[in-house]
Amino acid sequence: MLDRCCGLVATGTNGLEGISFELMVIIGVGIGAQWLASRLRIPSILLLLGAGILAGPALGIVGPEELLQDLLFPFVSMCVAIILFEGAMSLRFQELAGVGAPLVRLLTFGVVITWGLTTLLAHFVLGMSWFSSTLLGAILVVTGPTVIGPLLRQLRPVGLAGPISRWEGIIIDPIGAVLAVLVFQTQSAFHTGSTEHDAHNPLLLLGGTLLVGIVIGTACAWILSYALRHHAIPDHLESPVTLAVVIAAFTLSNQLRHEAGLVTVTVMGIAMANTHVSLRHIIEFKENLSVLLISTLFVLLSARLDLNEFTALGWQGGLFVLLLILIVRPVSVFLPLWGTRVLLRDRVLLACLAPRGIVAAAVASVFALQLGNAAPKLVPATFMVIIGTVVVYSLATPHIARWLKLSSPNPQGILIVGASSFARAFGSAVQEAGFPVLLVDANHSRTLEARLAGLRTSSVNILSESAIQDLDLGGIGRYMGMTENDEVNTMGGFHFAEVFGKSNVYQLSPRKGSAAAKDPNAAHLNLRYLFREEDSFTSLAERIEYCDIKVTPLTDEFTWEDFQQRHPNAQILGTITQGQLSLVDWEAELSPGPGTKLVLMEEKSSNVQLPES
């Protein structure tokens, strides 16, 4: 490192300016690709790969080896460690328990099937050695949660496919990383002719790696959690200290046991995620850092690609990717899930959700750097799989999900925050009309009443850091804040506007005298107000005691004008037109025509019969 710095000084200003320029290109192009991808609504990985190839082998602007030299391997390794730590911090044991046996089968039998079939294809289709084929098979067990997550948010599938795929994509990262490390250590021992007593014993290699990783990861997580719980670390230093501990734990583990660092950071992330410590500052920091690392790492790694090696794969490379998509993934889903309660259509959708991402690219690059010319096809094959799977799954899966009736391009379901008597009555009416409804309330007695009424419920804290990830939003496209707390309604809606869009988030009118009603500076947080200005939580709770909520259609014989004349006191809460649900807000101007269904609230004593809906 010192020699490198001395060399830079000796080269003068031009050397430093050249390095600064390359770093600027890597970071600028990476973030620019992320921004453009968000505007075009396409997977950012595709643009990041294209940008890296353009800046590297195509134009020769960026040369990672010349730029980082001996620092390239440690830098990529640490990026992988931080990315794995970030993924592991999303794992919470109580959330995984609900997924059940299907997930366990996918993560055991499914992993073995994927590894075995991919190894065979790599050897017989790509002509790779058994050494390289086995390692590639282990690497490609890993899927891409950074791709699956946005894809699931776009699809919002109903049924079991959504939650199973989401958790599979997260958990399989550490599984794939550990498997790849195990294969690499075992294969390297045979390849180098190591004489260590455990060099040829995979179980001893695995045991040593797991022991170091679990002990150091758990210890570091406990120490860090203890410090955070007892406020030993100032708020503004929580994120930097956490990052420093992660890097230190990763480095120490690798010193004790080669490649145990990946296991350590994974264990540390899982342990941190399941402590009762607020991780808000850390999570915000790691989300921003993750975007920067993914952007930088993809550009950096794709800039290293040798286009000649890439094209040398020929048609066999394309066939390899197609066989992974059409045979390996379906077999690794259908066989493990045979005899489970997962429906056929859910299995089909799961078979269409296995894109590879940054973890596969980074792990392959790390091992390729160590193997050198021993595995020339490892990196190009991995990147071809990444490009092929991201393109195919991103383009095909939305259409397949809609064909299976597991997704809608415009989901009409409602997330209702607050399970009050009015919310339960409204949710029941909307659900009976054919729309998905999910009620969220921390009050267990209310959620119990909602479940007894046949409604889907959750006790997740709507303001928690992971609420969006924790909830199954399949078929849901709107947010309704209907708790007695105006601030919770507002902040929850502001949170979910990132998912549904601000035009699809609603809240009840704030109480007179509440902070939300009095503070003019909070106007930018206010969402669309439901129903009428006077319809606060209290007024609706009182009225539902003597009112019913029902759905009734308008026809050519029973028009909107007829309805108004016969039911002057009925209040319209929403309309359903051609399968599209619209909620009434303060600015609504109603003029529904024949064929529209009205979601209305009317006194129970009304003795005028409505047409059957």
Image: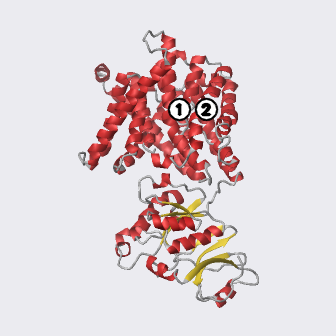
Q: Nearer the viewer, residue 66 or 12?
A: 66
State the mark number for residue 385.
Answer: 2
x, y percentage for residue 53? Answer: 54, 31
- Please report the residue visible at 25 percent of the width from the left and 48 percent of the height from the top: 230
- Residue placed farthest to the left in the image? 232
Q: Measured from the top left, where is residue 196 in percent x and y?
A: 42, 11
Question: Relative to 302, is 269 above or below?
Answer: below
Q: How many residues crowd mark 2 within 10 Å: few (<14), some (14–19), many (20+)?
A: many
Residue named by callout 1: 360
What residue is rendered at 58% in x and 43% in y? Answer: 101
**Of residues 596 and 429, which is closer to you in this image?**
429
Label 1's element? helix
Inspect the image, locate mark 2, and give the three-letter code of the amino acid beneath it: Val
Above-or-below relation of 167 to 264? below
- Distance from disc 1 to disc 2, alpha carbons, whole Å, reads 10 Å
Q: Is residue 254 left or right of residue 47?
A: left
Quarter holding the C terminus is bottom right
Cβ–Cβ under 8 Å for marks 1 and 2: yes
| 503 left or right of 594 in image | left
Q: Nearer the viewer, residue 296 or 506?
A: 506
Q: Amino acid at mark 1?
A: Ala
The image shows residue 87 at horizontal and vertical percentages of 46, 41
